[in-house]
C-alpha cells in the first residue's frame, strides 16, 4: 500500500499537497513500527497507561470547559459541545471512543485499587463522550461492543443489559434533551438533517470518484479538486448544509477512494482484512484473560473503523495516531500468542523433529 502511495505521486497534479498526504501515511506506519519494535519482547502495559493518562487529561479538560466555559490547555470556548483540546467535538468523541475500551483492561485485576480506578476512568470518559453530543461514536461503540459484552458476561447480566438499553430508548421517546436528539436519527432518519446532509455529500463524492475511479485524484488532494463539484453559491446547498459547502464527504473511505482510487483503498482495506483473519485463526489460543484483553482492543479498533463510514476519523491528524497506537498494541498481543503457540508446538514434537525446528536451531 505504501509503495502504491509513493507511485501515486507521479500522477498527482498537486505535488506539495500530495506529498503532505504521503507524509501522513508514513507517520502512521512509522508509529506502528516503532511501537512493535519497542515492545517486541515485553508487554506494552506502561504504554497503555500513558495513553490512558492522556485520556484522563483530555477528559478533565473537557469537563472544565463544560462548566467553566473555556478549556484550560488551548483556550477553546464552549459552544454547546465539549471539544477539549481538539478542533472539533466529533474528533474528540472519536478519540474517547478509542480509549473507553482500554479503561476496562484492568478490571479483572486482583488489586481493588486498580478495579476502582478503572471503573472511575471508564465513567469519566463515558460522561465526557456524552458531553460531546456526537451520536456516531456512541452508537458505533454500542453496536460493536454489545456482541462482545453479551458473549463475555454471565447470563444473569444479559437481562440487565437489555433493560438498560430499554430505559435509554424510553428516554429517547420521552424527549429527554440529549437522548431525544441522539435517537431521533434512528426513529426518523428520513427527516434528520444530519442524515440528509451526509447523503448529499456522498452524492457529490460519487461524482468525484466517477471521474478517476481506479487511481484517484491524488493523495490528500480533496480540497484542491472539490471546488468544481459543489454549487458555486453556498446558499444553493440543500437542507441546512450551507455550512458544509465544499466540506469533506463525512466518510473516510469515500475520501480515500477520491484521492487514491479503488486500487489504493482496496490495498488499504487488505491491511485490516489480513490482520483480522490472522486474529480469528488464533482465537483458539486465547485464555479467558487474554480473550478479554483482545476483545476490548478489538472493540476499540472495530468501532472506530465503523464510525469512520460517517466521518473522517480515520484520516484526521488528531485521531489517526491514537488509532494506529492501539492497532500496534493489538498486533503485539496477537504476535505474543503466536510465539506461545509455536513454543508449545515445538515442545510437543518428537525429539528428532524438535531439534530441527527453527526455534530450537536459533
Image (tube, rainbow, N blue to C red):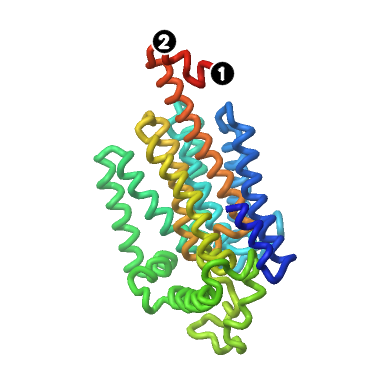
Q: Is residue 12 visible?
A: yes
Q: Where residue 160 sits in the image (x, y, percent)?
A: 28, 47
* The residue positioned farthest toward the right in the image shown: 16
Q: Is residue 66 visible?
A: no
Answer above or below: position of 76 versus 332: below
Query: Toward the viewer: 322 or 14?
Result: 14
Q: Residue 283 has which mark?
A: none
Answer above or below: position of 200 versus 304: below
* The residue positioned farthest toward the top in the image shown: 351
- SS type, badge 1: loop
Is 297 left or right of 41, judged from the image as shown? left
Q: Earlier in the sequence, mark 1 or mark 2?
A: 2
Query: Toward the viewer: 14 or 312?
Result: 14
Q: Residue 351 has which mark?
A: 2
Is 329 left or right of 276, judged from the image as shown? right
Q: Where residue 53 sits in the image (x, y, percent)?
A: 61, 41
Query: Toward the viewer: 117 or 146?
Result: 146
Asked if the residues shown at circle 1 and circle 2 are in contact, with their CB atoms under 8 angstroms apart, the answer is no
Which residue is tagged 1?
A: 362
- The image quadrant of residue 32 is top right
Q: CA distance from mark 1 to mark 2?
A: 16 Å
Q: Residue at x 32, y 39 (%)?
A: 153
Answer above or below: position of 217 versus 243: above
Amino acid at each position: 500500500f505504501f509503495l502504491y502511495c509513493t507511485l501515486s505521486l507521479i500522477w498527482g497534479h498537486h505535488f506539495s499537497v500530495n506529498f503532505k498526504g504521503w507524509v501522513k501515511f508514513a507517520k502512521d506506519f512509522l508509529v506502528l513500527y516503532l511501537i512493535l519494535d519497542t515492545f517486541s519482547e515485553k508487554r506494552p502495559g506502561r504504554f497503555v497507561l500513558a495513553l490512558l493518562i492522556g485520556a484522563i487529561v483530555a477528559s478533565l479538560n473537557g469537563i472544565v470547559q463544560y462548566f467553566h466555559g473555556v478549556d484550560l490547555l488551548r483556550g477553546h470556548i464552549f459552544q454547546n459541545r465539549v471539544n477539549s483540546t481538539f478542533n472539533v467535538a466529533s474528533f474528540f468523541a472519536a478519540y474517547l471512543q478509542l480509549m473507553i475500551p482500554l479503561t476496562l483492561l484492568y478490571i479483572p485485576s486482583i488489586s481493588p485499587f486498580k478495579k476502582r480506578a478503572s471503573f472511575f476512568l471508564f465513567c469519566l470518559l463515558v460522561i465526557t463522550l456524552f458531553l460531546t453530543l456526537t451520536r456516531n461514536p456512541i452508537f458505533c461503540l454500542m453496536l460493536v461492543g454489545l456482541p462482545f459484552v453479551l458473549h463475555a458476561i454471565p447470563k444473569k447480566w444479559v437481562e440487565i443489559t437489555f433493560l438498560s438499553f430499554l430505559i435509554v430508548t424510553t428516554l429517547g421517546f420521552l424527549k429527554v434533551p440529549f437522548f431525544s436528539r441522539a435517537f431521533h436519527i434512528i426513529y426518523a432518519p428520513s427527516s434528520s438533517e444530519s442524515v440528509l446532509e451526509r447523503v448529499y455529500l456522498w452524492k457529490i463524492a460519487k461524482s468525484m470518484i466517477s471521474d478517476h475511479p481506479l487511481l484517484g485524484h491524488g493523495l490528500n488532494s480533496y480540497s484542491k479538486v472539490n471546488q468544481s463539484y459543489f454549487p458555486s453559491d453556498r446558499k444553493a446547498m440543500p437542507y441546512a448544509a450551507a455550512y458544509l459547502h465544499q466540506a469533506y464527504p463525512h466518510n473516510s473511505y469515500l475520501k480515500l477512494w477520491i484521492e487514491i482510487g479503488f486500487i489504493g483503498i482496496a490495498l488499504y482495506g487488505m491491511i485490516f482484512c489480513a490482520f483480522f483473519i490472522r486474529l480469528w485463526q488464533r482465537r483458539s489460543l486465547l485464555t479467558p484473560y487474554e480473550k478479554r484483553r483482545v476483545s476490548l482492543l478489538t472493540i476499540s479498533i472495530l468501532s472506530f473503523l465503523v464510525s469512520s463510514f460517517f466521518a473522517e476519523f480515520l484520516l484526521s491528524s488528531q485521531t489517526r495516531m491514537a488509532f494506529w497506537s492501539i492497532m500496534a498494541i493489538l498486533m503485539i498481543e496477537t504476535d505474543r500468542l503466536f510465539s506461545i503457540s509455536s513454543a508449545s508446538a515445538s515442545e510437543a514434537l518428537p525429539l528428532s523433529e524438535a531439534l530441527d525446528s527453527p526455534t530450537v536451531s536459533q
